[in-house]
Image (cartoon, rainbow, N blue to C red):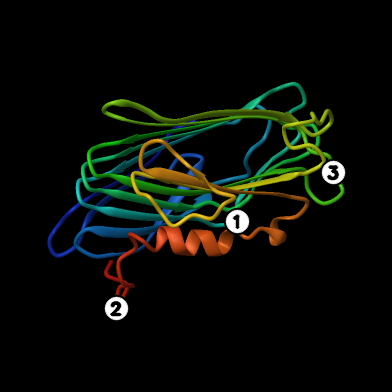
Amino acid sequence: MTPTRIAVRRGDPRARVDLAVGALAPRLISRDQARAHIALAAAGMILLGGDRVHLEIDVGAGCVLELEDVGGTIAYRADGRASEWTMEARVHAGGTLLWRGLPFVVTDGADVERRSVIDLASGAIAVIRETLVLGRHGEQGGRLASSFTARDSDGPLLVERLDIDGSAPEPGVLGAHRVLDSVIALGVRPPVTASDLELEHPGAIARHLGAETHTSRLDRVWDEWAGLRIPAPLSGPGL
Protein backbone atom coordinates (compact mmCIF):
# COMPACT_ATOMS: atom_id res chain seq x y z
CA MET A 1 0.00 0.00 0.00
CA THR A 2 1.03 3.62 -0.55
CA PRO A 3 2.57 5.11 2.63
CA THR A 4 0.61 7.68 4.59
CA ARG A 5 2.77 10.78 5.04
CA ILE A 6 2.52 13.71 7.43
CA ALA A 7 5.08 16.54 7.42
CA VAL A 8 4.95 19.84 9.30
CA ARG A 9 7.24 22.84 8.82
CA ARG A 10 7.18 26.29 10.39
CA GLY A 11 5.53 28.94 8.20
CA ASP A 12 4.16 32.45 8.22
CA PRO A 13 1.33 33.08 8.91
CA ARG A 14 0.60 29.32 9.16
CA ALA A 15 2.71 26.18 9.29
CA ARG A 16 3.21 24.28 6.05
CA VAL A 17 1.51 20.90 6.34
CA ASP A 18 2.01 18.19 3.72
CA LEU A 19 -0.35 15.21 3.84
CA ALA A 20 -0.49 12.06 1.71
CA VAL A 21 -3.27 9.49 2.05
CA GLY A 22 -2.41 5.80 2.14
CA ALA A 23 -4.16 3.12 4.18
CA LEU A 24 -4.63 5.91 6.72
CA ALA A 25 -6.15 9.30 5.91
CA PRO A 26 -4.75 12.35 7.77
CA ARG A 27 -7.02 15.38 8.10
CA LEU A 28 -5.90 18.84 9.20
CA ILE A 29 -7.92 20.19 12.12
CA SER A 30 -6.04 23.38 12.96
CA ARG A 31 -2.65 25.06 12.71
CA ASP A 32 -0.71 28.19 13.53
CA GLN A 33 2.83 29.26 12.66
CA ALA A 34 4.57 26.28 14.26
CA ARG A 35 1.83 23.85 15.34
CA ALA A 36 -0.53 21.50 13.54
CA HIS A 37 -3.35 19.37 14.93
CA ILE A 38 -4.17 16.41 12.69
CA ALA A 39 -6.74 13.62 12.94
CA LEU A 40 -5.85 10.19 11.58
CA ALA A 41 -8.52 7.77 10.36
CA ALA A 42 -8.59 4.60 8.29
CA ALA A 43 -9.07 5.25 4.58
CA GLY A 44 -10.75 1.84 4.25
CA MET A 45 -11.30 -1.34 6.23
CA ILE A 46 -8.06 -2.31 8.01
CA LEU A 47 -6.32 -4.43 9.17
CA LEU A 48 -7.25 -7.43 7.06
CA GLY A 49 -4.94 -10.39 6.48
CA GLY A 50 -2.12 -9.33 4.18
CA ASP A 51 -2.59 -5.56 4.71
CA ARG A 52 0.54 -3.41 4.92
CA VAL A 53 0.03 -0.07 6.67
CA HIS A 54 2.97 2.34 6.60
CA LEU A 55 2.91 5.76 8.25
CA GLU A 56 5.74 8.31 7.85
CA ILE A 57 5.85 11.37 10.12
CA ASP A 58 8.25 14.33 9.87
CA VAL A 59 8.10 17.14 12.42
CA GLY A 60 10.15 20.20 11.48
CA ALA A 61 12.52 22.09 13.75
CA GLY A 62 10.67 23.92 16.50
CA CYS A 63 7.27 22.59 15.39
CA VAL A 64 4.57 20.76 17.35
CA LEU A 65 2.53 18.01 15.69
CA GLU A 66 -0.50 16.95 17.71
CA LEU A 67 -1.84 13.72 16.21
CA GLU A 68 -4.99 11.93 17.31
CA ASP A 69 -6.62 8.70 16.19
CA VAL A 70 -10.21 8.56 15.02
CA GLY A 71 -11.81 5.19 15.69
CA GLY A 72 -8.70 3.19 16.63
CA THR A 73 -7.54 0.11 14.71
CA ILE A 74 -8.91 -3.43 14.57
CA ALA A 75 -6.84 -6.29 13.16
CA TYR A 76 -9.11 -9.02 11.79
CA ARG A 77 -8.66 -12.75 11.22
CA ALA A 78 -5.59 -13.35 9.09
CA ASP A 79 -6.62 -16.64 7.36
CA GLY A 80 -2.96 -17.54 7.11
CA ARG A 81 -1.78 -14.06 6.01
CA ALA A 82 -0.03 -11.77 8.46
CA SER A 83 -0.67 -8.03 8.41
CA GLU A 84 1.83 -5.25 9.13
CA TRP A 85 1.51 -1.84 10.76
CA THR A 86 4.62 0.37 10.64
CA MET A 87 5.15 3.89 11.92
CA GLU A 88 8.38 5.81 11.30
CA ALA A 89 8.73 9.30 12.80
CA ARG A 90 11.50 11.87 12.66
CA VAL A 91 11.35 14.85 15.02
CA HIS A 92 13.84 17.59 14.20
CA ALA A 93 15.65 19.91 16.64
CA GLY A 94 13.31 21.40 19.22
CA GLY A 95 10.26 19.74 17.68
CA THR A 96 7.51 17.87 19.51
CA LEU A 97 5.36 14.90 18.48
CA LEU A 98 2.23 14.25 20.55
CA TRP A 99 0.23 11.21 19.51
CA ARG A 100 -2.80 10.09 21.49
CA GLY A 101 -3.46 6.66 20.01
CA LEU A 102 -6.75 4.86 20.46
CA PRO A 103 -6.91 1.10 21.13
CA PHE A 104 -5.20 -1.25 18.68
CA VAL A 105 -7.34 -4.40 18.91
CA VAL A 106 -6.09 -7.82 17.75
CA THR A 107 -9.11 -10.08 17.22
CA ASP A 108 -9.26 -13.88 17.32
CA GLY A 109 -7.24 -15.37 14.46
CA ALA A 110 -5.40 -12.14 13.61
CA ASP A 111 -1.63 -12.18 13.05
CA VAL A 112 0.00 -8.74 13.25
CA GLU A 113 3.51 -7.33 13.09
CA ARG A 114 3.47 -3.82 14.58
CA ARG A 115 6.59 -1.65 14.43
CA SER A 116 7.20 1.89 15.70
CA VAL A 117 10.48 3.77 15.15
CA ILE A 118 11.11 7.32 16.39
CA ASP A 119 14.23 9.39 15.68
CA LEU A 120 14.75 12.46 17.86
CA ALA A 121 17.14 15.32 17.09
CA SER A 122 18.63 17.62 19.74
CA GLY A 123 15.98 19.05 22.06
CA ALA A 124 13.16 17.06 20.41
CA ILE A 125 10.33 15.50 22.41
CA ALA A 126 7.82 12.73 21.74
CA VAL A 127 4.88 11.70 23.94
CA ILE A 128 3.00 8.65 22.68
CA ARG A 129 -0.16 6.91 23.95
CA GLU A 130 -0.28 3.28 22.85
CA THR A 131 -3.07 0.89 23.88
CA LEU A 132 -2.78 -2.74 22.79
CA VAL A 133 -5.82 -4.97 23.28
CA LEU A 134 -6.11 -8.73 22.81
CA GLY A 135 -9.54 -9.45 21.35
CA ARG A 136 -12.90 -7.77 21.34
CA HIS A 137 -15.30 -8.40 24.22
CA GLY A 138 -15.57 -12.16 24.77
CA GLU A 139 -12.52 -13.00 22.62
CA GLN A 140 -9.06 -14.23 23.57
CA GLY A 141 -7.33 -12.33 20.78
CA GLY A 142 -4.82 -13.31 18.14
CA ARG A 143 -1.06 -12.97 17.73
CA LEU A 144 0.75 -9.64 18.04
CA ALA A 145 4.46 -8.97 17.65
CA SER A 146 4.97 -5.33 18.62
CA SER A 147 8.28 -3.45 18.67
CA PHE A 148 9.04 0.12 19.74
CA THR A 149 12.41 1.74 19.06
CA ALA A 150 13.40 5.31 19.90
CA ARG A 151 16.84 6.78 19.28
CA ASP A 152 18.75 10.03 19.03
CA SER A 153 22.11 10.95 17.49
CA ASP A 154 23.95 9.15 20.30
CA GLY A 155 22.08 5.86 19.93
CA PRO A 156 19.06 4.01 21.35
CA LEU A 157 16.80 5.63 23.96
CA LEU A 158 14.28 2.81 24.22
CA VAL A 159 14.11 -0.61 22.55
CA GLU A 160 11.21 -2.93 23.36
CA ARG A 161 9.59 -5.95 21.77
CA LEU A 162 6.43 -7.73 22.86
CA ASP A 163 5.31 -11.10 21.43
CA ILE A 164 1.91 -12.22 22.62
CA ASP A 165 -0.82 -14.61 21.52
CA GLY A 166 -4.24 -14.49 23.13
CA SER A 167 -4.78 -18.20 22.50
CA ALA A 168 -1.56 -19.05 24.40
CA PRO A 169 -1.02 -16.58 27.27
CA GLU A 170 2.38 -16.72 28.96
CA PRO A 171 3.14 -16.12 32.64
CA GLY A 172 5.26 -13.05 33.18
CA VAL A 173 4.07 -11.31 30.00
CA LEU A 174 0.42 -10.22 30.11
CA GLY A 175 -0.84 -13.23 32.03
CA ALA A 176 -4.63 -13.10 32.28
CA HIS A 177 -4.75 -9.45 31.21
CA ARG A 178 -5.87 -8.42 27.72
CA VAL A 179 -5.08 -4.68 27.80
CA LEU A 180 -1.61 -3.13 27.83
CA ASP A 181 -1.94 0.66 27.99
CA SER A 182 1.19 2.84 27.81
CA VAL A 183 2.17 6.48 27.81
CA ILE A 184 5.76 6.93 26.64
CA ALA A 185 7.60 10.25 27.05
CA LEU A 186 10.96 10.76 25.33
CA GLY A 187 13.29 13.76 25.50
CA VAL A 188 11.69 15.14 28.66
CA ARG A 189 11.46 14.10 32.32
CA PRO A 190 7.77 14.21 33.25
CA PRO A 191 6.44 13.93 36.81
CA VAL A 192 6.26 10.23 37.73
CA THR A 193 4.85 7.97 40.43
CA ALA A 194 6.43 4.94 42.08
CA SER A 195 4.79 2.64 39.52
CA ASP A 196 6.27 4.46 36.48
CA LEU A 197 9.60 3.67 34.85
CA GLU A 198 12.15 6.46 34.46
CA LEU A 199 14.58 5.94 31.59
CA GLU A 200 18.34 6.50 31.75
CA HIS A 201 18.08 9.40 29.31
CA PRO A 202 15.26 11.96 29.70
CA GLY A 203 12.05 9.98 29.39
CA ALA A 204 9.59 7.79 31.26
CA ILE A 205 6.96 5.09 30.73
CA ALA A 206 3.63 4.77 32.53
CA ARG A 207 1.77 1.48 32.06
CA HIS A 208 -1.50 -0.17 32.95
CA LEU A 209 -2.41 -3.87 32.70
CA GLY A 210 -6.06 -4.77 32.91
CA ALA A 211 -9.10 -6.53 31.53
CA GLU A 212 -10.81 -3.45 30.06
CA THR A 213 -9.56 -0.18 28.60
CA HIS A 214 -11.86 1.98 30.73
CA THR A 215 -10.12 0.88 33.95
CA SER A 216 -6.82 2.48 32.91
CA ARG A 217 -5.44 5.38 34.97
CA LEU A 218 -3.49 6.73 32.03
CA ASP A 219 -5.93 9.36 30.77
CA ARG A 220 -4.70 11.55 33.60
CA VAL A 221 -1.07 10.67 32.89
CA TRP A 222 -1.48 11.56 29.21
CA ASP A 223 -3.05 14.92 30.03
CA GLU A 224 -0.23 15.75 32.43
CA TRP A 225 2.70 14.52 30.33
CA ALA A 226 1.50 15.77 26.96
CA GLY A 227 0.47 19.06 28.51
CA LEU A 228 4.10 19.81 29.24
CA ARG A 229 4.55 20.83 25.60
CA ILE A 230 1.04 21.49 24.20
CA PRO A 231 0.63 25.19 23.33
CA ALA A 232 -2.54 27.07 24.16
CA PRO A 233 -5.55 26.08 22.00
CA LEU A 234 -5.94 27.99 18.76
CA SER A 235 -8.62 30.66 18.66
CA GLY A 236 -9.99 29.52 15.30
CA PRO A 237 -9.61 26.83 12.64
CA GLY A 238 -6.57 28.53 11.13
CA LEU A 239 -6.76 26.49 7.95
Q: Residue at x 82, y 51 (%)?
A: 137
- Judge from the rendering whether residue 143 lies leftward or rightward of residue 155; answer left or right: right
Tell me which numbered mark, 1 or 3, is placed earlier along the sequence.
1
Q: Is residue 28 visible?
A: yes
* Number of numbered discs: 3
SS category of the residue bearing label 2? loop
Within 10 Å of the Cα at label 1, are there few (<14), some (14-19), or many (20+) other Cα atoms?
few
| Residue 217 position by quadrant | bottom right
x and y percentages locating residue 133 in the rendered image: 70, 45
What numbered label is drawn on residue 235?
2
Mark 1 against mark 3, which lies toward the viewer? 3
x and y percentages locating residue 19 in the rendered image: 34, 47
x and y percentages locating residue 145 in the rendered image: 64, 27
Spot the residue most to the right.
138
Residue at image mark 3: 139
Tell me which numbered mark, 2 or 1, is placed earlier along the sequence.
1
| Residue 106 position by quadrant | top right
What numbered label is drawn on residue 71?
1
Spot the residue most to the left.
12
Within 10 Å of the Cα at label 3, are there few (<14), some (14-19), or many (20+) other Cα atoms?
some
Within 10 Å of the Cα at label 2, are there few (<14), some (14-19), or many (20+) other Cα atoms?
few
Three-letter code for the amino acid on which mark 3 is drawn:
Glu
- Judge from the rendering whether residue 124 lies leftward or rightward of residue 49; answer left or right: left
Compute the Cα span from label 2 to label 1.
Answer: 26 Å
Compute the Cα span from label 2 to label 3.
Answer: 44 Å
SS category of the residue bearing label 3? loop
What numbered label is drawn on residue 220?
none
Three-letter code for the amino acid on which mark 2 is drawn:
Ser
Q: Are marks 1 and 3 in contact (CB under 8 Å)?
A: no
x and y percentages locating residue 198 in the rendered image: 47, 43
In the displayed structure, would residue 44 be above or below residue 212? above
